[in-house]
Amino acid sequence: MTEQKSNIITKRTLVIGVLMGVFAISIVVKLSLVLFAEGPALRERADRLATRDMVLEAKRGNIYSADGKLLATSMPVYDIFMDPGAPSDDDFYENINALSQELGRIFPSKNASQWASYLKSKRDNGDRYVRLGEDLTFSQLQQVRSFPLFKLGKYRGGLISEQQHYRMMPLGRIAERTIGYERETDQAGVEGSFSSYLSGRDGHRLMQKIANGNWKPLDDANAIAPRNGQDVVTTIDTRIQDVAHRSLLTALVNYEADHGCAVVMEVSTGEIKAIVNLGRTEDGNYYEARNYAVWESTEPGSTFKLASLMVALEDGVVDTADIIDTENGIYQIYNRKVKDSNVKWGRGGYGEISLAEAFRKSSNTGIVKAIYPQYRDNPQAFIDRLYQIGLQEKTGIQIQGESQPRIPTPSDASWSGTSLPWIAFGYEVRMTPLQVLAFYNAIANDGEMVQPKLVSEIRQHGRTVQEFPTEILNPSICSESTLRQLQTLLAGVVERGTATNIRSETFSMAGKTGTCQQNYWIAGTHDYQASFAGYFPADNPQYSCIVVVNQPNPLKGYYGSTVAAPVFREIADEVYRSTPQETELEVIEEPQLADNVETNWQNQVEEGVIPNLKGLNGMDVISTLENMGYRVEIEGAGRVQSQWPRAGTAHPKSQMIRLRLG
């Protein structure tokens, strides 16, 4: 019985094993049929069903200059690859040597022999995606497509091309840092700040795979077309940008400076017509590496004296005719000394001079002696006035990266007993060149401070879709009386002060030199910043300009008058010469002078009454008045066009007479 059961179990096991074997064999047979017999048909069916969502890339908008020049645009470039396994053996080995000859010519990183060995090894290793070159233009791509083997077509020749968009600047590196860039992890300049306008919106289309690995659109009804980016029009004038670039570069090279910037702005609108930023790189050449004009915040030095005098004149605590004793050019306050630039071996200064002359000569001791005693007991009043002007605020220029200006207050932990006097001549405060220029531009613009503007409008298909109007930051930074005095002071710097070397007989200029010692707290350092800020023409301001040169070789020169002011003059010369001037025709009656007219007006002056000086020779009037003990401020050259005080006004000799010549 036991033996019978054992036989039954054995038979059953055998049957089950046979059935399982048959089942396994059927699976293998079926798999073989699928893979080898039905496989191609099934794969073709799968390919027909394969779809993907293809991104249709939007074209990035262009950036234009104010004079219509193309500053930045997108150009298609191509990266090329090869699938060495795509060609047949006959096609590959018949053409590889000829192909390698052409590749060696256009991509000389490898010679023909090296290219042949390289591609053969990649084919033997089964590599299907071998990089040949990148950033080819369309014409270069067409040339490569005509090479042996590749001209057989994509599938027989194995050439693969991938299109990219390369952002290029057709005018070279002009305003490169201001035009900027946009990357995945970083952005700068107009490209970065206006990317939402420039980038547009990508489109989408559903694609179906067809024979030979190609794709075709499935349904245009479901496609979303790309919306190309809009164009950005800047305020930059390439003519002015070019001269500013050349002039600044020449100064940097001549004085072996580390870096510098130059900005030209239209007075009434705040439109930036030129902005140049050049820094020396390791190879000794100068490139636009950083936007120094917008970003670099430093102690401005003597250009800040204008703000100090504005505060004091507004408060009525000083007069430009006040006499200041600069002594020997050294003024000690606590344990620190204010020194004039002409001090050598402990001696210098200018003796007793007017406050106006102290400004013209850029006397540190003169300015500090005028300001410090008036605000020593209440320095907050001085700081409050600076804040009322708006100097503690950013300009809000339309691109990113502007640094915050710093004007300390008595409540700051860093404030000391010498902070006020040092602020008075431009130390312990920090401003960018653009912020200093905005202040000087307000003086030229009759007291109205406007926001510097770099982009004027947005265009779509050549049509303006958005404009950026002039923004007013402060409608009036000071009174009319103070403004006129400051304008006279700035004109005097060029006519009779530290910037007489840039005076022109063709047109008038006004401005202030600046020479600031940097890293002065480090013993033995001789780093300087030379600058000049001003506007032109002085009598009808059209443009303001600032030039800043950092760390010139002190053996070559480091004063603002020597290093920076000539750059300002070159820019002003070119702009004035190439800008049509509006000529005002005015009928001027020739003064009817009797034989004794000179004696008559002199007699009036001796009696303490200011006569009508209009029409008289300016130099004769000045000489006579000064010989009689009067102090005279002049602007321009020629005959007297206007005067202060008015004719018939009683005027003591202790106060200034101001004349405008023309």
Image (tube, helix red, strand yellow):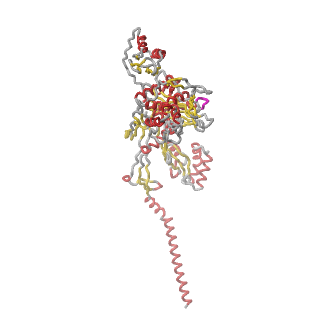
Q: Nearer the viewer, residue 376 or 158?
A: 376
Asked where in the image residue 607 lies, by quadrant, the reply is top left
Where the N terminus falls, by quadrant?
Answer: bottom right
Q: Is residue 556 left or right of residue 310?
A: right
Membership of 293 in magenta stretch? no
Q: Position of residue 188 (x, y in %)?
A: 49, 42
Regarding residue 583, the answer to whether it shows in the image is yes
The chief SS type of the magenta part is: loop
Where the C terminus falls, by quadrant?
Answer: top left
Is residue 325 shown above or below 94? above
Q: Nearer the viewer, residue 55 or 143?
A: 55
Give the residue displayed 45% in from the left and 31% down from the top.
310
Is residue 223 shown above or below 363? below
Asked where in the image residue 206 lies, by quadrant, the reply is bottom left
Residue closest to the far top: 595
Q: Position of residue 500 (x, y in %)?
A: 52, 23
Q: Position of residue 133 (x, y in %)?
A: 55, 46
Number of numbered callouts drawn: 0
Residue closest to the far front: 377
Q: Position of residue 96 (x, y in %)?
A: 58, 49
Q: Is residue 327 left or right of residue 454?
A: right
Residue closest to the far bottom: 1
Regarding residue 434, the answer to whether it shows in the image is no
Is residue 163 shown above or below 333? below
Q: Nearer the viewer, residue 149 or 7?
A: 7
Is residue 231 shown above or below 352? below
Q: Nearer the viewer, residue 163 or 379?
A: 379
Q: Bounds of the magenta span? A: 553-557
